Structures are given as C-alpha cells and as structure tokens.
Amino acid sequence: MINKIVVHGGTFHADDVCSVSIARLMNPKVIFERVLSTDGLDVNSEDGTIVADIGFGLFDHHGNSVQPRRDGGPHSACTLLWERFGTEIIEKTCAIDCQTAKKVASKIEDTMLFPIADGDNGIFGSGFTINDIISRLNPDWEHTSEKESDDAFGIAVNFMDKILKITINKAIAEVKAEVIVLDAVQKMNNGIVILPCFLPWEDVCIKNKDARIVVFPSNRGGYSIQMVPVQKNSFQTRVDTPETWHGLSDDSAEAVMPGMTFCHKNGFLASFRTQSDAIEAAKTIVGVG
C-alpha cells in the first residue's frame, strides 16, 4: 500500500502532478510532499513511501539507466508509475478483469500519459496541451512563496485527478465499444459497417482494410454515414462522397440524394433521415447501389 508520495518542490509540471494523481487512485488518502532533497528517503521503494521525479530512483526518469517506453519514447515519472501500477489500479478501482484492465491501462498511456511524458522531455506537441495548462497553474513571479507554490500545486493535482478519471472512464467505454464494433465489421457488406448506436469506431475500422463507410444513428436525429480514414487523424478517406454533395443541406441535399439532409463541405460525413436512406447512399458511394 502506498501511503505517501514524495515529488520535487519548486516549479511543478504535468508529470509530477500526474504522479500524485496516480498515487491518489491507488490510495485516496495518500499524503503527498514536495521536497528539494531526497536525503533519508528510499528512492527505490514500491511500497509505503515512494519517491517520483526526483532522486534518480525507481520512478525518476532523469537517470541514464531508464529504458524506453513500449512505444520507443522517453519515460517520465508518471509513465514509470503507470507501467508499474496502471493495470493493478484499473483492475481494482474499476472492478474489471485483468485482460480488460491491461487494454484500458494501455489506452490511458496512449491518450494521456505518453503525451505528458513527451512534453516533459521536450518533445512538444502542437496546441494547448495538458502540459501547458498545468504549467500555467504555477504562481507568477510576484507570488513566489513556498505556501503559494504548494497551494497552486494542490489546485493542479485536483484538476489532474478529474482529467485522469475522465480519461479512464472514456478508455473503459472504448474497450467495451470495440466488442460491438468488431461484430459489426465482421457482418459488413461491401465495406459498409452498420452500427446500432454511435460508438468510437475509428481504431477498429482502420485496422480492417476492407472497411470503407460507417453508418450509425446521429445524436442530432436521423442517421449519418462517415468515410473511414486511411489512418488515424487523417483527412484522407478510403472512399469519397461525390463532390456534387459537398456543402449541401435540406432541399438541395435531398435533390441530389434521396433522404440526405446534410453533407459536410469536405465530404467525409453526410446525414440522412432514415437508416435505409443512409445505407442506400453508402451503396452508391461504394458502387453497389
């Protein structure tokens, strides 16, 4: 049982903040302390009091002996902690089996922790990252007392707690969705995947080279079709809607394809009144309508 986690003092970052949040998942009553020296502490402890992001121990990535992450990237304190405790945390706190917990734990790494580690190691992503947000919670130059810094750190940890828990819940939902999407992919015809409800489908469908279009109920009513991208986060899709559809809505959309109510100006998504309308449109796109 981890009862206390020690991290470095001074300016805080997403890495040490997230390390405390991970410890709090293991034990909501865990005590955290910020120090400038690890004298007298066991920096290699995995139980009782653990030390992270300082001291060159088991959960500090600053030494030369730390091996790369499973994706080849550099570790940080929070990824070292998660590598050791992540599956155990998910299995116990979410009451799911070990195999599912491993999948969820990996998703947390990919989605949240590896980007934090990248930023902490100077591999900066574009946009306003969680590293940026946590950094901005540090007191400004006019408020530099130890108490002000510690108070700000507490605010950052509470914020990180919420983000980490939300990320875990979404990862669990995605793992559950994979089972349903895989079943739909196995039943697809002509590359058209029909889902019973909106689900996170992209990862599963991209892995199947034959999946081309996904049909699903829209949360705005009616049904939508979406083209499967050639790879994750790509705007290039395996098939394209006709250019004559792009940017149309309402009557003008209906005029070119029965039941269509909208087509995105870039063509990757279109909406329809009924499921049968959406399926017929998908068949037209893949050339079997």
Image (cartoon, rainbow, N blue to C red):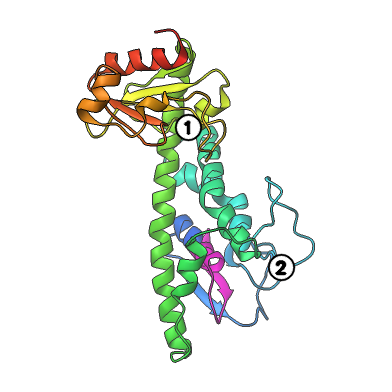
> Where does residue 198 sit, x and y in percent of width and height?
33, 30
Q: Is residue 38 magenta?
A: no
> Where does residue 272 sit, x and y in percent of width and height?
27, 23
Per the image, label 1 sits on a secondary structure element best described as helix
Amino acid, disc 2: His
- For the record, the magenta segment spans 1-20
List the residue tagged with mark 2: 62
The dot on residue 2 is: none
Pick the quarter of the image with the C terminus.
top left
Identify the residue at image location x=52%, y=48%.
111
List the residue tagged with mark 1: 202
Q: Nearer the viewer, residue 256 or 185?
A: 256
Above or below 178: residue 24: below
Count all numbered tags in the image, as a single digit: 2
> Where does residue 200 sit, x and y in percent of width and height?
42, 33
Above or below 234: residue 222: above
Identify the residue at image location x=67%, y=57%.
75
Q: Nearer the viewer, residue 223 or 240?
A: 240
Q: How far separated are the C-alphas under marks 1 and 2? A: 36 Å
Mark 1 vs mark 2: which is more N-terminal? 2
